[in-house]
Amino acid sequence: MVVSQALAVRQDLTLAPDPRRVIVKLFVPGEDAALVRTRAHALIDRVAHLDDEETGRLLRDTFDRFGGRHRDLDSTFQHHYDLVRHRADPARDLSPTTRLLVGAYFSHEYAVEAAALCNPSMVAHPDQTGLEPGQLRVAVSLRQIGEGHLSSIGFATAVLGPGRRLAVADRSGPPVVGRRVGVRHRRDLLAAGLAEIDCDNEVAATVLDVLPERYDEATFERVLGSLPPDLLSRSTGLSTLEHLRRTNAASYATAFPADSDLHQRVLWPAIPAERNGMEDARFVRFVDESGPVYRATYTAYDGRHIASRALASRDLRRFQITPMRGPGARNKGVALFPRTVGGHHLALCRSDGETIGLTRLDSANRWQVPVPLRTPRHSWELVQVGNCGSPIETDAGWLVLTHGVGPMRRYAIGALLLDLHRPERVIAELPGALLAPDEAERDGYVPNVVYSCGGLVHAGELWLPYGASDARVGFATAPVSALIAAMVEPAPPMGG
């Protein structure tokens, strides 16, 4: 493999997974068994039989052991008690202390990045105060992997510059999972979801006709509740209601406390489509006439199926999360452009699993059939090619970082240049890899991989965060002018 590694300079600083970063999850004894049978009632009964002195001592001991590792632990215990209180004996009036202790018994710690930390992306941070000339504060998204290969999205904060200096802020302090908040649903997204499953009948059409362009949960349920009985009595009536509710629930919003730091925030699976992980977030700072907004795509995994999903946030504190629809959003690796091009929202994708494509969002909020941009053609990428994040706008064109997979499933990072006004045209490519695993990076949770979900340009330098064998996160820089100067005309497809 020809490697253009003279262009890329690795930083000495790396981020390693930290098993001390723990959250509190609901724990229901028996539900992890092969035959699911909760033991909740018996456990609550045993706790309820403890005397007041023992109950108080156990609760104090629990707070002494775990209080410093978590934020607002008593509220978490109360919430977990509320989730299982229906299993308690209705004739027994539990004291507030006993309820908290029950909540503690139905809780456990989960180390969000005990197994791996990888696949970062980087965007300008919303707070640029207190910096010296030549510096840029950035938000780094991270794929955190814990027990059971369960992925969530975390963050770090760093400062770039002056020059090639890099400083990553301390990530200490209790992580916090976002709480569900009210969401304003979009009728067009509901319609796109129904079209995806070919749900087109009089019940669905009536609901879409009555719903306003934006609506809340109460309005949605009120519309469903007012459907005429002669429509609901049709053979598809009840199944359509189920489709409507499931499709509507695919969109939600989550928010974090205003006084939480970015590195403490954990985007945790919140719906069935995500229950086995939220993977590989590709963040971009999108700018249009309404101002900047942070957008990202990620892969949701439910244990059997994957799905592309999108999130949006003005401040990286409150996030609105929605499914992505259409043939261009199938498979993994969707990456949004940072602005519209020719009035259209565009994205890179890999809908066939092995080819970089360009897809456009249509008026029905469906990502259209992609135009192929790049098929595997070099020896180091013959298994597949894909993007390493959103395109980066330069004077010469859209800089696209790519990943290629070669022999022994070895991943390397390359680069393409797309026409600024006609991004379906590839005008140049780096003839070799920009970054490939070196001897210090080849061993890890997933060996022989370097992979990024997006970098940025600051002061003429490309800043590229990358996962090294899913064991740690590294950083590399390359002069943009030298990188573009090293590009050549695209090679013809193999056999062409």
Image: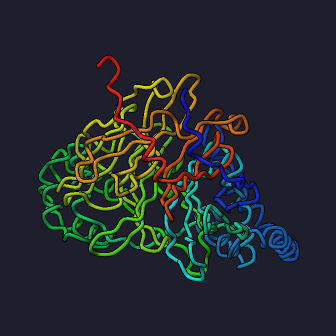
Q: Nearer the viewer, residue 110 or 457?
A: 457
Query: Which image quadrant is residue 261 in?
Result: bottom right
Q: Quadrant of the N terminus?
A: top right
Is residue 248 at all visible to an observer of this figure? Answer: yes
Q: Position of residue 295 (x, y in %)?
A: 40, 62
What colouring does the structure picture have? Answer: rainbow
Is 319 on the left or on the right of 74, as rendered?
Answer: left
| Residue at 78% from the left image edge and 72% from the top image edge | 68
| Residue at 45% from the left image edge and 41% from the top image edge | 486
Is 385 on the left or on the right of 357, as rendered?
Answer: right
Query: Which image quadrant is residue 83 in?
Result: bottom right
Q: Position of residue 110 (x, y in %)?
A: 69, 55
Q: Position of residue 440 (x, y in %)?
A: 73, 38
Q: Position of residue 196 (x, y in %)?
A: 25, 45
Q: Nearer the viewer, residue 90 or 489?
A: 489
| Residue at 59% from the left image edge and 70% from the top image edge | 262
| Residue at 34% from the left image edge and 35% from the top image edge | 489
Is residue 275 at all visible to an observer of this figure? Answer: no
Q: Is 219 placed above or below 202 here?
A: below
Q: Is 149 placed above or below 52 here?
A: above
Q: Is 293 placed above or below 451 here?
A: below
Q: Nearer the viewer, residue 280 or 432?
A: 432
Q: Is 447 placed above or below 459 here?
A: above
Q: How many marks?
A: 0
Farthest top residue in view: 495
Q: Quadrant of the C terminus?
A: top left
